[in-house]
Amino acid sequence: MRWTQKLNESIKRGLRSWLNVVPANPYSIQINEVLDFEAHAIRNRIWYRGDSNELEQMYQQNPEYADKYKFWACKCSPGMEMRKIHTGLPGLIVRILSSIVLDDMNDFEFKDAKQEQLWKEIEKKNKFSKKMEKALKDVLYIGDGAFKVTINTKKSQYPILKWYAGDRVELVRDGDELQEVVFKTPYSDNGRTYVLNERYGHGYIINELYLHDKLVDIKSIPVTANLADWKFDENMMLAVPLQIYESAKYEGRGGSIFDGKLDSFDAFDEAWSQWMDALRAGRAKTYIPECLVPHDPETGRLIRPNMFDNRYFAADGDMRDGQKNVINTDQPAIPHESYLASYVTALDLCLQGLISPSTLGIDVKKLDNAEAQREKEKATLYTRNAIVEALQETLPEVVSVCINAFNILHSKGNGEVDVNIPFGEYANPSFESQVETIGKAKTQGIMSIERCVEELYGDTLDEHCKQEEIARLKAEQGLMEADEPSVAGMDGLIQNPLSEPPQEPKKKEEPPKAGE
């Protein structure tokens, strides 16, 4: 027995000595990019515009890899055509997110009154609210963009603020530091397309004109002939990029809310289109003998049905023995529940991580509990918070650049601009629910009248009105204002000094008379 154990141990030792682990060979995976950032932005723009004709043309022109099997890229067989319907969901998401953010953006808060007045003039001249609305929509579905500040005394005495979407902007970075923002503007002249590149850097603006990626003279076309380079304070850059998310595909560029969602949008359109196609195919069909088919009164020919109404179909054999000339109507069964389940599932995939269905006005079986309703809005709240954070970081820089550009125009120094961008709270509970919650807290004795008024009215009333409301409530409830509790020598109820025994007045000492 011992010799078998020794043999087994020797075999095990031998196996251990023979074990040779060969490391994995390095390998590479090659991915061919179908679209660059600009083409990616164009594709997102078409989805945002929501034209079904444009969607079908785009996907059928690029049948590469997985795109050729998508709903919008597929072609119907002859005689089996179906409607392709776009739901318009991507554009709706962008518009709703933009509105719920900008509607809550309050007036900018400045520490310097002169800067505040100057910004109001610049804001009015540039129609900033409209420009901001367009900028936010572009950033949401494209990924990024940039504001450009120019000075043209012939048009305005104030700086001119312009917005460029991400497909017309190139960001030049050195690591994490922004070096230049290149604004691209196409011009057509004599059948040729020129592109003006305006390079905005720290303390300079350089204008370059390109024709088919070849640098040409800036005076080649009349619209750019009078442009000149400009140098100013190196601590300033008259361009401010704006982005909310970072792109996972294009380094240094912004991410779109459509990233990772286009396949879901395509499937959602397919689910809706098939449902509507089933409804059309499921219309009642009437079968009648050929002898009973209506005839055209002018030509005498049989009136044939079309693919839309399917009003009737001719049936042969009406002259056979025992044949009854009976008109039959057939109503196919449509699996509405299955189509509805597919529709809801596809919709859920489209909205996950972006926005709540209730924000879009989609019925989600509203609950009575206000807190539960706020929980449903958390998806929207997270997206909104990301947008608000990006705007609060970028817009002060935009304001600062505009004000300092005005100072440069009037030969003033470059100064610091302290501005705050306040936003209101989203998804506030209703006034009725607030009254109910605060009333319970007051009844249970865990909230004072002052706190109740503050929580209920917040910023809707000024401090003077709040104090009047507090005094009125206390008077109605029979509460009296009282000072601090008594201290030594004070009466705790009346708050008057305790009475002291009267003291006899001291007699004045007369000076001694002479001789005494």
Image (cartoon, rainbow, N blue to C red):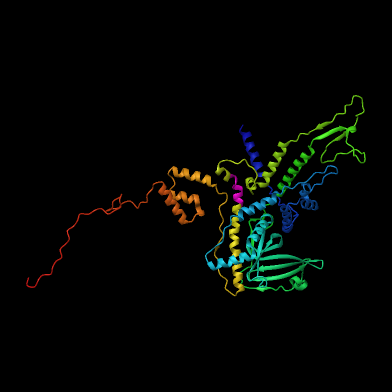
Give the residue displayed 68% in from the left and 50% down from the top. 92
What is the quadrant of the N terminus in the image? Answer: top right
Give the residue displayed 47% in from the left and 55% down from the top. 465
Q: Residue pushed farthest front?
A: 297
Find residue 485 and report its horizontal and vertical position in percent: 33, 51
Residue 190 or residue 58, whichever sits in front? 190
Q: Is residue 175 visible?
A: no
User: Is residue 472 found left or right of 3 in the rendered image?
Assistant: left
Residue 407 or residue 495, whichever sits in front? 495
Find residue 321 and report its horizontal and vertical position in percent: 92, 25
Residue 392 or residue 287, whichever sits in front? 287
Residue 224 position by quadrant: bottom right
Magenta stretch prevailing secondary structure = helix
Find residue 389 and report its horizontal and vertical position in percent: 59, 56
Residue 357 position by quadrant: top right
In the picture shown, does residue 412 fall above or below 466? below
Number of numbered labels in the structure image: 0
Q: Residue pushed farthest bottom?
A: 411
The residue stretch that appears in magenta: 375-383
Residue 232 or residue 102, whichever sits in front? 102
Residue 159 position by quadrant: bottom right
User: Is residue 152 found left or right of 374 in the rendered image?
Assistant: right
In the picture shown, does residue 129 fall above or below 225? above
Q: Residue pushed farthest left?
A: 515
Find residue 109 and report its horizontal and vertical position in percent: 54, 62
